[in-house]
Amino acid sequence: MKQIAIRKHFSYFKTNSEEIQSNSFDEKLDQLDEELRAVFKKYGLEMVERQTQFLPIQKLSIFHCEQCNQLMVNRDMNPTKFDSNGLYDDLSYVVLDGGTHDGKNLCEECLPFAHRWGHYS
């Protein structure tokens, strides 16, 4: 039986409101997409969809984990994370839950198990 394998690739860059409004990254991202299409084609893959989402860093309390550098939402500061917004469902693999422990922002993987937002709590 034939099947289609769909693979997601995630990446991110930091920007600000002025760059978003001026579309200054559009040309670079278009060039990146063309280069990615060529690489995918080399391996018999097709790039069929891409999507860019902008997340307000301060409003959502997004940090890098101070232990492993993973992107995370500090749930001690933002207990609702993405407010159950379906647009962000895929991002749970990219932006992990996390919290504060001993004054450090730590992702769910690095928090102690006993912490409210620890991976196994």
Image: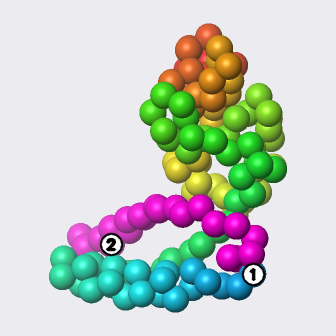
Which mark identifies residue 4? Answer: 2
- Range shown magenta: 1-20
Q: Is residue 60 magenta?
A: no
The amino acid on which the numbered mark 2 sits, given as a three-letter code, is Ile
Give the vertical position of 76 relative to 43 (above or below).
Answer: above
| N-terminal label among 1 and 2 | 2
Extreme residue in the top direction:
114
- Up the image or down, 32 lies above or below 3; here it is below
Residue 119 image offset from top left, x and y in percent: 55, 25
Q: Residue at x 37, y 88 (%)?
A: 34
Q: Report whether 76 appears left or right of 33.
A: right
In the rendered image, residue 63, in percent from the top left (x then y), is placed at 63, 42
Give the residue at x 52% y 48%: 93
The dominant secondary structure in magenta is loop
Q: Which residue is labeled 1 in the image?
A: 21
Q: Residue 80 appears in which quarter of the rendering?
A: top right
User: Which residue is painted at 52% across and 88% down in the image?
Assistant: 27
Residue 101 position in % (x across, y down): 65, 18
Relative placement, left or right, of 17 versus 12 is right
Quadrant in which the C terminus is drawn:
top right
